[in-house]
Amino acid sequence: MSFLEWGDEYITGIESVDNEHKGAVEIINQLYELSGTNERSHISELLGKFYDETKAHFENEERLMKEYKIFNYFSHKAQHDRLLRILREFISEFDNNHKELTPQFLNLLHDWMINHFKFHDGKMGRELVEKGAK
Amino acid sequence: MFGAGNFSLSFSSGSGWIILGVLILLAFSVFYYRFTIPPLANKSKYTLILLRFTGIALIFVLLFAPELSYVKTVKVKPVNIVFIDNSNSMVRADSVKRRKEIIKLIKDFHESGKFNSKFFLFDKSLRALNPLAPDSLTFAGRATNYELLFNKIKDFEENASNVVIISDGNPTEGVVPNDFSENISVPVYAVGVGESALAPNVEVGRVITNRTVYKGEKSSVEIAVLSSGIESGASAVSLFLNGRLAGRKKIILNSSGIIKTRLSFTPKKIGINRLTVVVRKLKAEKNIADNRKLIYVNVLKKKKKIFLATSSPSSDFEFIKRALISDSNFVVRDFVEYSNEEQISYGTFKRETDSSEVLFLLNFPTAETSPKLWSIVSSAIKNGKPFYLQITAQTDLRRLNAISEELPFKFKSYSKSYLDVQPSPSGNSALINELSGTTFEGFWEKLPPAEYVKTNLFISPAAGILLYIKKGNEKLNFPLMISAGSPVKSLVLFADGIWKWKLKVDLNSSMFFNSFFINSAKWLGNNKNEGRVKVYLSKSAYKKNEKVYITAEVFDKLYNHAENAAVTGLISDGEQKFNVVFQKEKAGLYAADISGLPAGKFTVSVKAKIGEDVVSGKGKFTVEKFDAEKIDVPMNQNYLTRISKETGGKFIPLANGVKLADLLNRKSKIIILKKKEGINLFPSEYLLIFIIFTFSAEWFLRKRKSLI
């Protein structure tokens, strides 16, 4: 009954990437659990953690894509940059008490993750596995 | 009573009378043989006296129902009676483990016991169990009947030293005594099976929301969260609309077991939308099937589209258009036909006509109306499009024949002349009050006169007259306004110049004019097939002891949520009937609940009274056959402890069952039983034979001595 359920269809076949994806899913579910509460400091802490881990994860993916010369590197990176920008803006607004952790924002993360896992990372994973990455 | 040692003799009457009688009989016997002819020797005389006295004394004594009894003392070995609950509730939570534990306990108890034990299984019936063949211990019993068990204890003929009950303490059948100590004379050792407390659980209870909502309009959902097995704690309720998170709220559970909260959603999709309420699982919660509830809401387009068409512009047209535009629930499109046919976009006209929910036709069709336009409009009406038709002198009545089947009247005759009249409401039409928003008597007569088109009509049976005409003080029997619900919903007004009704400001008629046409458009736009009372059940099938939650959504004539309706319900399975009264939850939503219904298929008929208007709706649900043993209830430790305490025994949890054998061995004692046995001497055949013998012997001796 999690907000964002991890499924086998999201497995890329690259162990480090999959572990980082699972970590991101876990944090989004924790954010979902905290939504609707007044625990702003906890939410802020978790949002910071999510941003840091997502940034590190994107860097890992981008490094792998460059190393193995994956075809859609630039469009994939643009997706990453877009999410990081959204997260930065949201965290800044949230920390200044201008925004709440709303269902809309959680839905955005939910949809972004599912689409990105399925259509970008899945494709990237297949190419990386074909090229011998682990 | 005479007694000697362990023997005793008792009579039905006082022994003093018997002694007196016996002495009299002795005196009679002596007196009888005092002198005999021929005289006898003393030996023979005393023998005859003895025989006579014995015979008659015995007969006399027998009249007092003598009973000879004796008490014998026996040593009886103690027997432990072990009752094992074989009902299904014993192993609901963990069947394999519990079954193993219980069988082990029985075997250990049987093998280590110093004294005899008798094992019985009980559920719906009671039967003996061979403890070495515990396969008959199925835990499939459909009931737990403690009455059988108590009866068995009372009737037990052997030395019942202790009683052991291995059970979860939840009787579901039979009558159990209030005072165990009075009914059971031996100590009861209760071995409790199961968890002693309810497992923590939260569930989504009643969810109340309007089942008909409008696109883009925020709607609230009232949610009741039920909790059990937990004194306090935090949880959260989420609301998902079509799988998307719409809202979330933290809740603090408390010992009351119910928390109400409110979330909201804004539907974006027209049609049936799925709302899911999810309550967060507790840490130790096992049953999460009830943490989620799904309901459906019907999302309607927010605004009704109204299409006004005229072939000849008029003040009435403009005023009615403005009135309709003033209501934000309408999207109003209008069409004014000009003579230059080349400029008319028939495609647009058709689109507007077909996409609108209500048509307003003023001065349409006239003699100049384009046949194509009239064809589009008449086809739409023939296809069931509701319409408002204002018949003026410009209206070409002959062309109305194209929709003669859909019109609520037929012309007998008509003229193109006008008559200045005032409206006068028909006394029996509640609809006119609903449309005008007033029941003020005399209101209509105070409106400025309108120009009435003289007609002579046949009113169709499905139609109703809303307004008559009034000329001066005389109310004339000519209809000014007619309504019909079928075959097409329609309102027809035979008047021109009604814009003047707006001028009568002293009666707030400015507002009246607007609301009259807004309400008319609403009435026309309501789908006649949709009921005004919608009945929703929280689910379609209930368990027998489960509460049935019924919600009724009630609409007034204009399909607004009814604010103050008196709502009652009748629940019936064809044979039995149950009444419920609904309480208002919010505007248009009324709720009731009922529990304890028998198993069966039920229909709930809901009747809502809105003023004088009575509307009804129906719903259906099933109450399934109840299987008490299927309900996951905790062990009733209080009950088992009470039986044990009141009888001088002890409560032992199953986990400590190994101690049971030792405990009972210490408590079991050989008892010395004094058993009383008695022989009823009347009618004792041996005694009767003896009496006959005494009389026979006496007769023989008398014969020998020549006395007879």
Image (cartoon, rainbow, N blue to C red):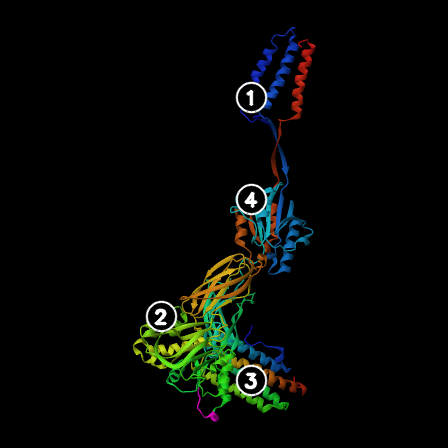
Q: Position of residue B347 (x, y in %)?
A: 51, 88
Q: In terms of image quadrants, where is residue B499?
A: bottom left
Q: Which residue is mark 2?
A: B439
Amino acid found under the numbered disc labelled 2: Thr
Q: Position of residue B408 (x, y in %)?
A: 46, 75
**Disc 3 and disc 2 on one polypeptide chain:** no
Q: Which mark is residue B257?
A: none
Instruction: Identify the element where label 3 is drawn.
Output: helix
Amino acid found under the numbered disc labelled 3: Ala
Q: Which residues are magenta?
A: B335-343
Q: Position of residue A131 (x, y in %)?
A: 67, 88
Q: Residue furthest left?
A: B506
The subunit letter for the residue under badge 4 reads B
The tag earlier along the polypeptide, 1 or 4, is: 1
Q: Is residue B341 magenta?
A: yes
Q: Position of residue A16 (x, y in %)?
A: 61, 82
Which of pointers 1 and 3 indicates the residue nearer the eye? 1
Q: Which residue is mark 3?
A: A56
Q: Which mark is residue B18?
A: 1
Amino acid found under the numbered disc labelled 4: Ile
The subunit letter for the residue under badge 3 reads A
